[in-house]
Amino acid sequence: LTFVPTWFAFGASILSDGEHLFVSAPAFAAGDGPGAVYVFRIVPDAPTLAERFVYTQTLSLPGVAQQDRTLRMTRAGDALVIGADGHGYSTDGAGVLANEGLIYVFRLDLDPSETWVYEGQYLPDELSGTPSKFGAAVSGTPDGKLYVSAPDAASPERVDGEFLQKRGRIYELDLNRR
């Protein structure tokens, strides 16, 4: 695959569903701007390797930066899910990093152009503003179930405004269309 993007860490993670190849790029080479995932259509019977992967689209990921060194990707039913555990990276007055993370959801629009369409992003309310790293790992099933880790999610108990212990959590979501 010969492709020269202007993005930082092109290929930090990849995913194939047999029909598409998804290649992550967390940020512009200069370090600013949104991250992205490049989408290539796989042409299995192409005569050359260069013709086997046809670039089709760039999925923009607002808020993703170099702190998301590896975007995690999975398919869950007809959705493409991208986990960005470094989303929300910031330094507050005390110098604390707040990597709350989130997931982005895209769906394949089959008519007329077969493009991936942004559906939205998700972060559980109880993790908002916490350094949980939601989206550090994502795993989907063909029937639309999605499992998302938040390895730094804290216990719900607080003492003097601080979480007692980081225990981690796994979330199960259903991405089936209703």
Image (spheres, grey):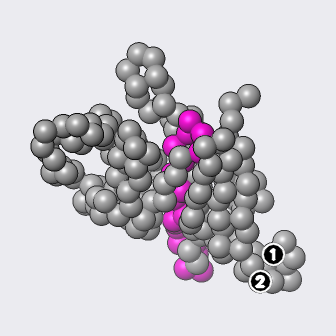
Q: Nearer the viewer, residue 159 or 178?
A: 178
Q: Secondary structure at mark 2?
A: loop
* Label 2 packing within 10 angstroms: few (<14), some (14-19), many (20+): few
Depicted 39 relative to depicted 32: above or below: above
- Give amino acid for label 2: Gln
What secondary structure characterizes most of the magenta part? loop
Mark count? 2
Q: Residue 58, labelled with which disc?
A: none
The residue where tag 2 is placed is 165
Indicate left or right for 28 with 148 as reference.
left
Residue 14 x %, y %: 38, 57
Tag 2–tag 1 contact (CB < 8 Å): yes
Q: Earlier in the sequence, mark 2 or mark 1?
A: 1
Residue 137 x %, y %: 57, 64
Depicted 155 relative to depicted 39: above or below: below
Q: Is residue 32 visible?
A: no
Name the image quarter holding the C terminus: top right
As drawn, which residue projects farthest toward the top? 112
Residue range of the region highlighted in magenta in the rendering: 76-95
- Give residue 121's quadrant in the image: top right
Spatial distance from mark 2 to mark 1, Cα to Cα?
6 Å
The residue where tag 1 is placed is 155
